[in-house]
Image (tube, rainbow, N blue to C red):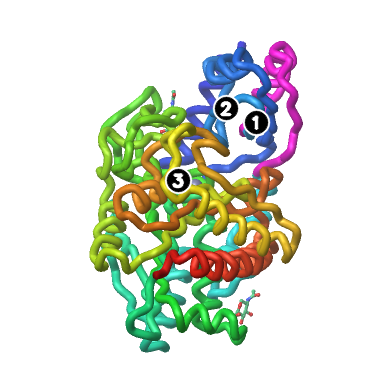
Amino acid sequence: MKLPILLIALVAMVAAKSAPGRMAARYDHFRIYQLTIETNLQMEELKKIHEHISIHFLNELGAIGHKYNVIVGPLFHRALEKTLKFLDIVFEVIVDDLQKLIDDSAVGNDSKMEWETYHSLDTIYEWIDQECAAHDYLECKVIGQSYEGRDIKSIRLSKRPGNKAIFLEGNIHAMEWISSATVTFLLNQLINSEDPEMQRLSEEYDWIVVPMVNPDGFVYTHEVERLWRKNRRPNGYRNESGDCFGIDMNRNFDYHWGGAGWNIDEPCDHWFGGEKPNTEVEIISLQNFVSSFEDGYIRSYMAYHAYGQYVLLPYGHSNTEFPPNYEQMKRIAAAFSDAAADVYGSTFTYGASGLLNYVVSGAAKDWAYGVKNIPFTCTVELRDKGTFGFFLPSNQITEVGLEVTAGLKALVNKAAEEGIFD
Ligand SMILES: *[C@@H]1O[C@H](CO)[C@@H](O)[C@H](O)[C@H]1NC(C)=O
Ligand SMILES: *[C@@H]1O[C@H](CO)[C@@H](O)[C@H](O)[C@H]1NC(C)=O
Ligand SMILES: [Zn+2]
């Protein structure tokens, strides 16, 4: 009895996705359930649940003792709840209508760049071009094109010769809109803030910013599928629904590549790390750009992501092996965390990503540390802790920008004290 309904829903979904004019997928009455997984058995069963329930995992399944958010459509609410109860999995409906949440965190007035709403790629890029034209200490360069031919833009701010540089990476994951919003917020502070401390940071350090590593995926989240994570290259695999697209680019860097990570080897899933490392033109452009600077110039590399409020340090591939200056990196991350919490009380947990989150290989921060020898690298997971998750309302963008600005100031000062820039 269930099958025909499922088939109709599937056909309707496929039709909507391939319709001319690119109608965005809708999530009316889809719920987000938050599951607390306490035993290995529950985890094993959860991993198989898609066999009878249409489910979208918002987080990679990793260690037990964690909460995991999943999206389930109205046709499957009852079946899911029944299964969860049967498995003794504690759950909570944290979002009753995902479409409403998506609408509340949609792009608002996109006519001009500001940080009260999310923006389209065009508006972000237009703003970058305007700032570049207006300030001669900004050097703006297209570092390469995405698979679908969109520019990947970079901005280097340098007001003084001899400075060391800090690198900010944004939106490698398409759906994490708060990432590019925050990175552009920071850049705007560095360029336009009247705050003397911010002006000092923009004098004494060079800043290299790539706010949009994944423009194809980003445009796709605006036009077709808000939940998209990877880039958009057809990856050569197909399943019953057709061709599968994209690589999780933060699993494709060549440092202990492919060692670990849930579904890192599932081509049609959101976390596919590629068939081998360095296959994606976007991250090859990024790597070449980083490598184009002389060794020792870039002293910190920060990749901005959502969500969970973490400062994740190397390594990702192991929870038993730690970087030589791990304790030093922890002190620097602690400075960020303390200062960020002072602003609105948001707490950022810090430590090795393999330890705090789950073991996963091929991330940018591990490559920057392990291959490029940059002495302080991290992934910053921005707000929140899972209430809104990837769909953080736009009225929080400025708050996130301000807390991260405070965190960043403290981080840079601590890193300087620790000799990172010497
Ligand atoms: C959108 O923003 C622009 C510039 O900030 C403003 O002039 C315009 O009135 C706004 N439009 C709407 C519909 O709010
Ligand atoms: C095939 O993969 C896509 C993602 O590329 C997924 O949305 C879809 O549910 C998968 N289909 C089946 C039948 O597993
Ligand atoms: Zn991410």
Q: Position of residue 356 (x, y in %)?
A: 57, 38
At label 1, counting other C-alpha atoms closer than 10 Å, the crowd grade (few under 14, some 14-19, many 20 or more) is few
Question: What amino acid is found at the position of numbered circle 3 in the picture?
Answer: Pro
Report which residue position mark 3 lands on: 314
Between discs 3 and 1, the one toward the N terminus: 1
- Image disc number at residue 63: 2
Assess disc 3: are there few (<14), some (14-19) or many (≥20) residues with their C-alpha within 10 Å of its C-alpha.
many
Instruction: Answer whether labels 1 and 2 touch (C-beta < 8 Å).
Output: yes
Instruction: Give the residue at x 67% y 64%.
Output: 339
Q: Splitting the image into four quadrants, where does ligand 2 fall?
A: top left
Q: Closest to the observer: 149 or 179? A: 179
User: Horizontal placement of 274 versus 391: left or right?
Assistant: left
Q: Which dot, 3 or 2, sits closer to the camera?
A: 3
Query: Count the marks: how many?
Result: 3
Of the residues tagged 3 and 1, which is closer to the observer? 3
The amino acid type of the residue labelled 2 equals Ala
Taking 278 as reference, is 340 above or below it?
Answer: below
Does the closest atom of ligand 3 sit within 8 Å of the Cβ of label 1? Answer: no
Task: Please tell me whether mark 2 sits on a helix, a strand or a loop.
Answer: loop
Q: Which residue, given by chain and number where applicable, does mark 1 sit on?
A: 66
Three-letter amino acid code at disc 1? His
Q: How far apart are marks 3 and 2 (CA)?
A: 18 Å
Please indicate whether residue 18 sits to the left or right of residue 41 in the image: left
Considering depth in this image, is 96 or 315 the residue closer to the camera? 315
Q: Is there CB contact under 8 Å for labels 3 and 2?
A: no
Q: Which of 18 and 56 is in front in this view?
A: 56
Is residue 7 at all visible to an observer of this figure?
yes
For residue 22, side relative to residue 95 (left or right): left
